[in-house]
Image: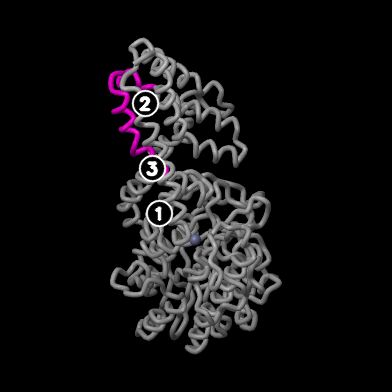
Amino acid sequence: MSLGKQKDSFLYLLLLILLIAAPGIYFRILNEEWNTMLLNVLCTFCLFLLPIYIFKNHVQKYAWLLLPVFLLGTINIACIYFYKMPINDGIIIVAINTNKDEFMELAAGFILPFLLMATAYLSLYFFCRQKVPKQIATKQATILSSASLIIILFLPIFDNADYGYFQKLRARFYTTFPTSFLYSVGVVYKQYQVMHAAADERAKFTFNAKQTINIKGEQVYILVVGESDRRDHWNLFGYKRNTTPRINNQQNIIAFNNIHTDGYLTEFAVPILLTGVAPENFMDHIKQKSIISAFKEAGFSTYWVSNQTDFGHISIHAAEADEQFHFLADGNNIKNINDDIELLQPIKEILSRKDSKKLIIVKLQGSHYDYSKRYPIGYDIFKPSNKTIKTAANDYTQKEVIINTYDNTVLYTDYVLDSMIQILQSRNTTSALLYVSDHGEDLFDDARNLSQHAAPIPSRYIAPVPMFIWYSSHLKKQSPATIDWLIKNREKKGSSTNVFFTLNQLSGIHFSGLDSSQSFASSRYTEKPRFILGGDFKIFSSDSLQ
Ligand SMILES: [Zn+2]
């Protein structure tokens, strides 16, 4: 082979590496991260040219070995398109927690574009791969490998970050595909390892909780955790459309109008509101039990009723319940999707049992995308919606249709919650229902045109969530001061963490670690700075999100 030809074919190897870096380049340009983009591209080239000395006589074999990177690359491109970020630990957690049906709903509009993109991307790989040289001269290979090593070692010097050399070196690989993928898998694996490791500590944990008020007859407390439900789309909290006609008409509702979520993913937000750990100490939740066990210790039967597949961080606390009812997770369930109203059936069944003290935790599917699948046609009030017009989840040109559909999910949640309250009302005993959403949702609110809830940095539309407490007249008679304090504190700043303390106190449960300054039901309630756990376990001030 002539030198000229060898040079030409070597260019195809460089082109292959450029293809690996391309999705990252696109993402960084979109997010105006020029400095990171240039350093990452350099890092990608050095990373893949570093072993060239070893493969100097087998360059085509080396190119074959890159095939898995390209296969993973198609997923990475899909993540950038769909989640607006490269594949990371947050996406992996969501992927693990998503069952086949949820995935199919999510992927429905994307299968054809994905196949076209993957075919094009892999065709480019195969085209370039067959043109790479068979071998590279020892001298050139030595220069390429050593230069790559030297550049890699010098990369941290160009990094403006405020930490040490080796941390900067590691960070470069954490943010560069495909080492970023290995890093994310490692993070998720470590999480599950930690959860397993803390199992003994969790098992030994006790609140020493007792119910200190003496209540005769039945007591039922229901904690309903919503899904992707935004406070500013509730008429009860001032939204222009009447999305909450039933709750608006309910008596004995205390609406809390300044609550933020502490975690932008379900997997973060739910454990926080169940255990009361602060988002900055999120991993502490795995060492302790949740409100379910506090109620158990105080003599309550406890139930977990879920319309979502709960996994990892959530499932360790669901497992504390005496009994669990799962819909999506139930492999025997022949229906693909359950409307949230179907959760009433296990709730009625639980209430028909003889035990007099019950705590029921309910996890809704609520307003999770695909919005049009969350409610029956009778609730298709705001039109046109995705019931009739199919759109991609992130198609901002169809913003109006998607928001109409979203508002119909809120209207339906209003119906589901009202139905639960009616069941409690009909029993005429001591009862309360606390509703709070796990987190908000992006709905193309500004020029960023964000959708759903997976932007790399949580937006200010993710944080505010609706929360209210409905209480029975019996409860008001039993604990008038508690109800009064809930009403007095309803305008105050609060977050998911407060749910744990508030619900315990509302039901008269006490233990030494119950911090009443975090309970809305207390005269001692104190506002605190709020934080939100974002992707990669980063903490953001939730009052200063953009
Ligand atoms: Zn969620």
Q: Which residues are magenta?
A: 50-74
Q: Position of residue 455 (x, y in %)?
A: 55, 50
Image-quadrant location for residue 327: bottom left
| Amino acid carrying mark 3 in the image | Leu
Q: Position of residue 18 (x, y in %)?
A: 47, 31
Image-quadrant location for residue 486: bottom right
Q: Which mark is residue 95?
A: 1
Is residue 522 toward the left or the right of residue 197 in the image?
right
Q: Is residue 62 magenta?
A: yes
Is residue 478 toward the left or the right of residue 345 in the image?
right
Identity of the residue drawn at 55% across and 80% down:
415
Give the mark, 1 or 3, whose residue is nearer the N terminus.
3
Q: Is residue 504 magenta?
A: no
Residue occupied by mark 2: 132
Identity of the residue drawn at 47% across and 72% down:
212
- Check disc 3 and report its element: helix, strand or loop: helix
Q: Which mark is residue 159?
A: none
| Amino acid carrying mark 1 in the image | Ala
The reply to whether callout 1 and callout 2 are in contact (CB within 8 Å) is no
Q: Position of residue 85 (x, y in %)?
A: 51, 45
- What count of labels does the image hold? 3
* Quadrant the N terminus occupies: top left
Q: Position of residue 331 (x, y in %)?
A: 29, 68
Give the mark, 1 or 2, whose residue is nearer the N terminus.
1
Q: Which mark is residue 72?
A: 3
Q: Residues within 10 Å of mark 3 (few under 14, many from 20)?
A: some
